[in-house]
Image: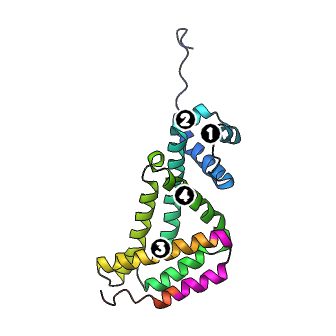
Amino acid sequence: MNGGIAMARPADPDLRPRLLEKIIAYVRENGVAAFSLRPLAAAIGTSHRTILYHFGSREQLLCTVFDTMREAGAREIEARLPTHGDPRAIYRALWRHLASPEMRPTLRLFYEMYAIATRDPRRFGDYARRTAHFWLETISLRFRNAGASPERARLLGGMTIALLRGATLELAATDEAERLTGVVDAFFDLLPPAGEGA
């Protein structure tokens, strides 16, 4: 007390990142199809008003969660991908990482988020488009570094990301890793070297 006036409690600058960490853990465990703020707040030991104050609406919160998880996943993938070398070998190795059993929950959650954002772009903004373009640029870069022209690198990158996206979606649905690894390997056997026709 100071002259009869209560001093305001200073804001906790670490509260938002701590809440976000808990929210992401909750989403990983429960998915997003039935995501609601009140059950979330109860599960992580806070109030839905606190969540609204720090993150805005349910959709704004989900966009923050989606982007944070995408950025973390991107950093992990980038750390695994050599920037130079034969892109076909690089992306065969990437597929084997994505096809590992421990990645299955992450793939399923990614496609759940992607579908929700794609279905309602008015509420979720350009998350799906941003994600698609990010991966197109990431994949295409390795083809440019291997000698392809920018136009050809973008074409080969587009082909590769379409194959990997389709294969990972089917893997998330079927768990048929061995069959899909054969499909992915056959695709890269047929894909010409990056510099050919550059």
| Residue at image mark 4 | 115
Outermost residue to the front: 119
In this rendering, the label closer to the viewer, 4 or 2: 4
Q: Is residue 173 magenta?
A: yes
Kindly identify the amino acid type of the residue bearing the numbered disc 4: Ala
- Whichever of callouts 3 and 1 sits on the residue coming sooner in the sequence is 1
User: In the depicted view, which residue is nearer to us: 90 or 135?
Assistant: 135
Q: Earlier in the sequence, mark 2 or mark 3?
A: 2
10 Å crowding of disc 4: few (<14), some (14-19), many (20+): few
Residue at image mark 2: 52
Reading the image, the residue beneath label 1 is 37
Tell me if I can see residue 83 in this picture. no
Label 2 vs label 3, nearer the camera: 3
Query: Which numbered disc covers residue 46?
Result: none
Secondary structure category for the residue under label 4: helix
Q: Amino acid at mark 1?
A: Leu
Identify the mark nearer the N-term, 1 or 4: 1
First to last magenta residue range: 172-186
Q: Nearer the viewer, residue 32 or 27?
A: 32
Give me the residue at 64% from left, 55% from top: 28
Judged left or right of residue 39, residue 129 is left
